Image (spheres, rainbow, N blue to C red):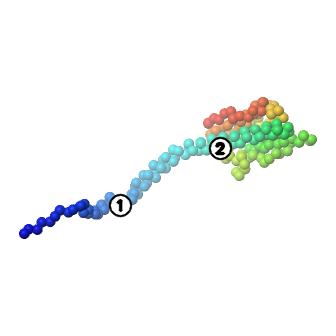
Amino acid sequence: MMLTSDPPRGRPFRRHQALSADQGRGFSLVELIVTLVVLAVLAAVAAPSVTRWLAKYETEAAARQLMSDLETARMLTVTQNTPYRIYFNQAGNQYWMQSQNPATLAWANAGSARQLSTSGNIAYEQGVALSFAAQGDQTIAFTPTGTAPGGITAFLTSAYWQSNVVVANTGRVSLVQIKQF
């Protein structure tokens, strides 16, 4: 009698293969260096754009803060029937709100100064300079009807951007122009 083996039933037995030399290893030093060089080139290309974007953001933030302060002075003048003004010190790159004492007609500070060049200050925006067409300190005062006789234009300038905040004779405060250098 002859014995024959039966074919295996079910799944055939799988053999584990030994790992080849290309499997199970990390990145080579050359691959890592090439990746880092590509990332460095991309960062160098993107850096000027980020710098310009930050300058635009800081210039716009300073302009919005100035607009808000001017509108607050106008609102306080109308609601309290007491003259308020914004006093600008160009040399110090700062400004502050002042109210007028009705009895003495003297101006007194009504809040803290907004100094654009001092870190930690409320209105600090690095690299933003405050200027006007005329030299020296400037003021814009509001009347109890909300008008601003004479009007004024403030220039807020950074390395790449300029925002102009305009107060019209009617007392309307607006951001007129943002331009890139």
Which numbered disc covers residue 24? 1
Please give the count of numbered marks on the rendered protein.
2
**Residue pointed to by mark 2:** 58
Dot 2, how many residues are within 10 Å of its Cα: few (below 14), some (14-19), or many (20+)?
A: many
Dot 2 falls on a residue whose secondary structure is helix
Q: Is residue 153 visible?
A: no
Q: Position of residue 95 (x, y in %)?
A: 77, 43
Dot 1, how many residues are within 10 Å of its Cα: few (below 14), some (14-19), or many (20+)?
A: few
Left or right: 27 with respect to 128?
left
Q: Mark 2 and 1 residues: CB-CB less than 8 Å, in contact?
A: no
Left or right: 87 with respect to 129?
right
**Residue at the spot 52% in from the left edge and 46% down from the top edge:** 44
Which amino acid lies under the numbered mark 1 shown in the image of this protein? Gly
- Give the quadrant of the C terminus: top right
Left or right: 73 with respect to 178?
right
Task: Check the image and name the residue furthest to the left.
Answer: 1
Relative height, residue 168 to residue 88 (above, below): above
Res 19 → quadrant: bottom left
- Give the quadrant of the N terminus: bottom left
**Residue at the spot 68% in from the left edge and 33% down from the top edge:** 176
Q: CA distance from mark 2 to mark 1?
A: 50 Å
Dot 1 falls on a residue whose secondary structure is loop
Relative height, residue 175 to residue 40 (above, below): above
**Residue at the spot 73% in from the left edge and 36% down from the top edge:** 154
Q: Position of residue 173 (x, y in %)?
A: 73, 34
Relative height, residue 97 to residue 4 (above, below): above
Q: Nearer the viewer, mark 2 or mark 1?
A: 1
Res 165 → quadrant: top right
Which numbered disc covers residue 48? none
